[in-house]
Image (cartoon, rainbow, N blue to C red):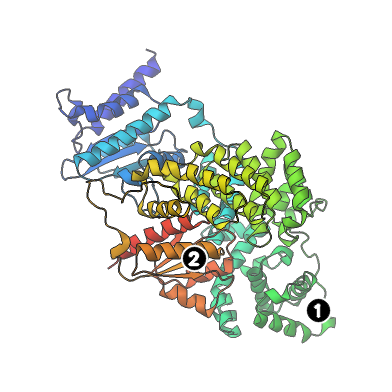
Amino acid sequence: MTQPQEKRREAVERFLQRFFGPGNGAWPGLSPDFRHKDRSVPFVEALRRGDDAPVVLPRAYTDRDRFVVYVIARDISDRAKTAELIRAFAGPTYIAYEEQVGIQPVWLDPDDPVERAILDFFGQRPTFRLETGRTLEHKRNLANALQLMQRTEASRPPRLWRVAKPVGRLLAEFEASLSAGAEAASGVVLDHLAATGGMTAFNLANLRIKRLDRLGKSEELLNSPDLADVIRQDPPVPVKEAILNAVYAALEEPLADSDLPAARQRLQERGRFVPDLLDVDATWLGMQAITVLLLAASVLEDMPVLRRLIETVNSVDRANELPRLVWDDAVRQLQATDSGQVPPAENAPSAGISASESTEASSPVDSWPTLLAAVAKDSADGERALKNRTWASWPSPAADDAVLAAYLDSLEDQAADEVWQAVGAFIDAVGYDRPAGLTAHAFIRNAVTFDRFGPGDLAVLQALTEIALRAAPSSQTYADILDEIGAERSRWVSPERAPIALDFVDLLFLAACPDLDARSNLAYNLLEPLWRHQGRLNEADLAFAKRLSQEFSIDFSWQDRRGGNGGQEPTLADTPSKNVLLYSLDEAVLGRCAEEIQRLAPAVKPVTAHDHVGSTQLRQKARTADVIVLATRCAKHAATGFITQNARTKHVYYADGSGSASMLREAVAGLRAAATDR
């Protein structure tokens, strides 16, 4: 044994003596005579061997009836990976955690001798403290699940654990996750990006701001401690728009009440950063951001800026999208000013290019075909167009659907991998209006070819499938799409990923079907693994799986959900009267989710909303809701921000996807949590 190996062995033994010392009765002092030592031996031996897997160590408190298992990541950057492993092997069946928060590392107590030993030996590695039921069966089940996790990870080639995705691919996953409404997945990818060390603090702050904007968390965005620094460094147009959207959320209520003075007052209270954003090009901004700029220019009596904004809005014919109150006031104020004393705006921003980029030649990227070509070549023009959302002012990709699909299918591997960076922009641009089915199908082939089956990737794949099926494909194309999705199902269908599988099956039920056999086959193949492991499904997933099984006439024997002690688990049927607000732009999804909530909890009243902007009715729904669930795919920020601004409940949840199953899971989690309120 070499000297470093000997030193490591000695350090491990010293740590184990401390860990199983005072305060831990799981294997006191590693005594060879302890009769229950066999429960801890596999975990101790894995640490001694140095297996390439998370460290797992049990603890039985000596001063109270409490049993926990510590899971320690192998590396400081493996937080998200370790949480996903715990969820995959132990899931909600064997451990207790809040569904809306997920599995998170804990702060260890330095005054506790056992946790002090972990801190001293493992330093800042993420550590998870897992709890289960108090019976021997509960403890044994958790131990067996975590042993399987360790063995599985240790048997894999070490490179699979250590190889990190390139920053470019992680960025593409982040943008695509946001566009597909994968709230939790986008957070995980953001954690990965922060852990890689390949991004500046400024760029990470930009991504956090974009995510908060998508979730409608306006207050959190405006209160961000990094906001002033971000603005000083001239962020990309989408980040500026996100900040303006957050300010708009504070104005929406007085604007809905046609109270312009109150809106001006709110702007002065909440918009302290807006004057620094007045130079942004409004060509590609959304309605709410333009509204804030118009109102700010009016309050500041900045006539050059006001003139430029009005000219921009008129040039793209978007005045009818703005609040009439603000638009009319801005036009009236400009007309009332002596035109001879109002010089035209000078040095107006061009194509969203920041001051630092103004010396470069103007970008040739001005359409979807040129965007995909630029991104595939990994050019700076393509990167800039995605970063600044220049595509927002173009016609829908549906206008060039056949051309785009043919181009995507013609790409060699490297270019095809690069072009995936544009998939989030494509999903956002298509929305729920004009489907670009051929292009969506080409992106589906790309996803399958490059094994894009992570949590965020699957939400993107589901969004692409929805777009492709909404385009009314032929019978053969329909069958091809379903075959491509189902070909690798064994790699991603599991109880831990039940909502995404159920969302796919739900989509099959809702979409027009030109091939019943293809639809039935895929529905069966996606439901069958869930049926086999139905004991690991939570209440919402099990209920929706039963419903889909019945709708497709698939004869699976679904059981009632049972608790770990063999008794009947409490159901939602006894939930007291509650109001649940469901928000999505997909009305069919809203309807099915509401129906299932009413079936599971008859006393609960589900209310749905698909508004694009705030209204008196939406305000009332938000204020009276006990639980709110938002689906953010293609969400209108004005509406989501309005809902969160007016919510009077702490139980606001975000579906990790855009299907009925994803929404139902969060609604059930919210009702469970709300039922415990006193």
Residue 33 horizontal/vertical position (percent): 14, 23
Taking the image as shown, residue 3 lies to the left or right of residue 354, namely: left
Q: Which residue is mark 2?
A: 591
Q: How many marks?
A: 2
Residue 584 horizontal/vertical position (percent): 53, 64
Q: Residues within 10 Å of mark 2 (few under 14, many from 20)?
A: some
Taking the image as shown, residue 42 lies to the left or right of residue 418, namely: left
Which corner quadrant holds the C terminus?
A: bottom left
Which residue lies at the image location 34% right of the left edge and 27% below the top edge? Answer: 47
* First of labels 2, 1 by sequence position: 1
Taking the image as shown, residue 341 lies to the left or right of residue 528, namely: right
Name the foreground residue: 243 vs 622.
622
Look at label 1 and name its amino acid: Val
Name the foreground residue: 618 vs 116.
618
Which residue lies at the image location 42% right of the left edge and 51% below the top edge? Answer: 545
* Residue depth check, mark 2 versus mark 1: number of the one nearer the observer: 2
Name the foreground residue: 113 vs 89.
89
Which residue lies at the image location 36% right of the left edge and 62% below the top edge? Answer: 600
Single out the residue that lies furthest toward the bottom.
336
Residue 623 horizontal/vertical position (percent): 43, 75
Distance Cα–Cα, label 2 vs label 1: 53 Å
- Is there any visible trace of residue 223 in the rendered image? no
Residue 633 horizontal/vertical position (percent): 57, 58
Instruction: Give the secondary structure at mark 2.
Output: helix
Q: Quadrant of residue 246?
A: bottom right
Q: Which residue is mark 1?
A: 342
Look at label 2 and name its amino acid: Gly
As drawn, 542 above or below 256: above
Name the foreground residue: 131 vs 191.
131
